[in-house]
Image (cartoon, helix red, strand yellow):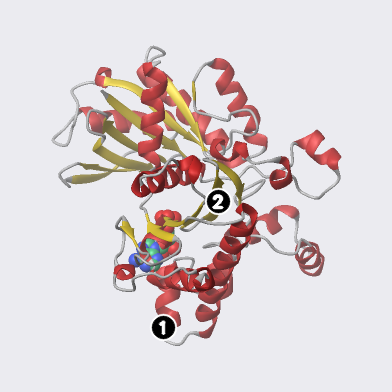
């Protein structure tokens, strides 16, 4: 059975076609610059790939390019789209409505559109993706939506409420939702599997550290807290995002610089984090390299991010009253030995020890902790597309 996974953004559409007999990826790619020009990059399982510039005024044309890439030419992997049993869509914001993945119908599309108020850029684009998909494949092919927020819906109110006047929660649903849920779910499931224990018996802290960063506390098999909040701006310092800070900084700078709410939003989301502090780049490789060569602002940016990750991990250990396993994932978590060594080192007082040779490995699933370590430390490459495909399969098999 073949399942197509789609992740539609405002100007891009990423896709993967999986064969669920063995959960292998048959082809994957991305349509970019939708609305301005249009480019597709397509790759098949044996590594062969092509790129082409094709006009994509809307998501409908982008979806047609994806259909052509999968079904035509030398790199086709299926004869026709009728071989695809179902489509799974990644959706950023499911609000408090969607605590699990669900089959798409007209009401679900309307609900996702309504939630765009909470995630304007993302949810509106997801709806375009779903509609383009239905237009190309027809209504007979089941579509499933998988939400970044669902995994965090188990948080208790004390973790998801903000200490602002209660009326804003009632009027506008202002609360912590959390994001990267599909990734936190995948790596915590895999961690329990690797440890050979039921997830409900483990206290796990999962660190998804990439351009966007979030950390989750998982106890009794469910998420009890996570660092991203009302939007993905909350929590840790990220590639270009501030993460948590004193809200007065915003009103102070806005008044001094005469900046509008939109400009402040841009500053916090796009010009801050590693990029803002280093003045060089949002890419942790660039910032780390420059720090090693003596760039002081890059050193500061790296130090700040590592310190914050350790601080959050510590707070979640207190929130859970213990920890059995610490998991690193995401581009930085999977590849940056410096981050992992620092965070594990700060947990030395708990009896955490890691193997520094294994810590040099990049992008591999590996247990970093030594046999005598009191807490297991893992690197687990995330696989959000696989979770989306599995959820899709489970829902259509019901
Ligand atoms: P993601 O958003 O998960 O794709 O992660 C992107 C981040 O991972 C960027 O900041 C990259 O610089 C970082 N990253 C990827 N590879 C490495 C590496 N080998 N060493 C350090 N950081 C890396």
Vertical position of residue 212 compared to residue 304: above or below: above
> Considering the numbered disc 2 on the image, is that residue within a helix, a strand or a loop?
strand
Sequence-first tag of 2 and 1 = 2
**How many C-alpha atoms fall within 10 Å of the one at disc 2: few (<14), some, or many (≥20)?**
many
Residue at 25% in and 33% down: 69
> Where in the figure is residue 331, as x and y percent of width and height?
40, 58
The residue that disc 1 covers is 292
Discs 2, 1 touching: Cβ within 8 Å: no
Could you say whether the residue bearing mark 1 is in a helix, strand or loop?
Answer: helix
Q: Which mark is residue 381?
A: none
In front here: 371 or 308? 371
Q: Give 20 or 262, whichever is nearer the viewer.
A: 20
- Residue tagged 2: 216
Q: Please state the horizontal and vertical placement of residue 91, each as a whole percent of the image.
A: 51, 35
Q: Residues within 10 Å of mark 1 (few under 14, many from 20)?
A: few
Q: Is residue 10 above or below residue 210?
A: above
Q: Quadrant of ligand 1?
A: bottom left
In the figure, is residue 350 to the left or right of 246? left
Measured in 3D between alpha carbons, the distance from the residue under mark 2 to the one under mark 1, in whole angstroms, is 30 Å
What residue sits 37% from the left and 49% below the top? 195
């Amino acid at each position: 059975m073949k399942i197509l996974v789609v992740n539609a953004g405002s100007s891009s559409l990423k896709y993967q076609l999986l064969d669920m007999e063995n959960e292998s990826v048959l082809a994957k790619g991305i349509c970019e610059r939708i609305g301005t020009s249009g480019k597709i990059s397509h790759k098949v399982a044996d590594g062969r790939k092509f790129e082409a510039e094709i006009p994509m005024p809307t998501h409908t044309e982008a979806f047609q390019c994806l259909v052509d890439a999968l079904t035509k030419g030398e790199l086709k992997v299926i004869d026709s789209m009728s071989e695809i049993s179902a489509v799974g869509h990644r959706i950023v914001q499911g609000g408090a409505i969607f605590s699990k993945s669900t089959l798409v119908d007209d009401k679900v599309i309307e609900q996702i559109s309504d939630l765009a108020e909470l995630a304007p850029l993302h949810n509106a684009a997801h709806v375009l993706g779903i509609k383009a998909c239905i237009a190309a494949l027809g209504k007979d092919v089941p579509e499933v939506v998988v939400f970044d927020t669902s995994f965090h819906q188990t948080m208790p109110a004390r973790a998801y409420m903000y200490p602002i006047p209660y009326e804003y929660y009632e009027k506008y649903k202002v609360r912590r939702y959390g994001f990267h849920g599909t990734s936190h779910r995948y790596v915590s499931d895999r961690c329990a599997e690797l440890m050979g224990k039921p997830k409900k018996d483990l206290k796990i802290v999962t660190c998804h550290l990439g351009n966007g960063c979030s950390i989750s506390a998982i106890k009794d098999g469910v998420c009890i807290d996570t660092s991203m909040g009302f939007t993905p701006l909350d929590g840790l310092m990220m590639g270009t995002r501030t993460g948590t800070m004193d809200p007065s900084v915003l009103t102070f700078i806005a008044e001094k610089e005469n900046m509008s709410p939109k400009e402040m939003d841009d500053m916090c989301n796009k010009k801050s984090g590693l990029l803002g502090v280093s003045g060089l780049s949002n890419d942790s490789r660039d910032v780390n390299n420059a720090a090693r060569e003596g760039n002081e602002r890059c050193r500061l940016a790296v130090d700040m991010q590592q310190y914050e990750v350790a601080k959050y991990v510590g707070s979640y250990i207190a929130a859970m009253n213990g920890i059995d396993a610490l998991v690193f994932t995401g581009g930085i978590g999977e590849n940056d030995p410096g981050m992992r060594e620092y965070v594990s080192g700060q947990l030395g007082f708990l009896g955490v020890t890691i193997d520094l040779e294994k810590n040099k490995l990049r992008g591999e699933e590996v247990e970093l902790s030594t046999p005598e370590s009191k807490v297991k430390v893992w690197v687990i490459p995330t696989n959000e597309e696989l979770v989306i495909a599995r959820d899709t399969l489970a829902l259509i098999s019901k």
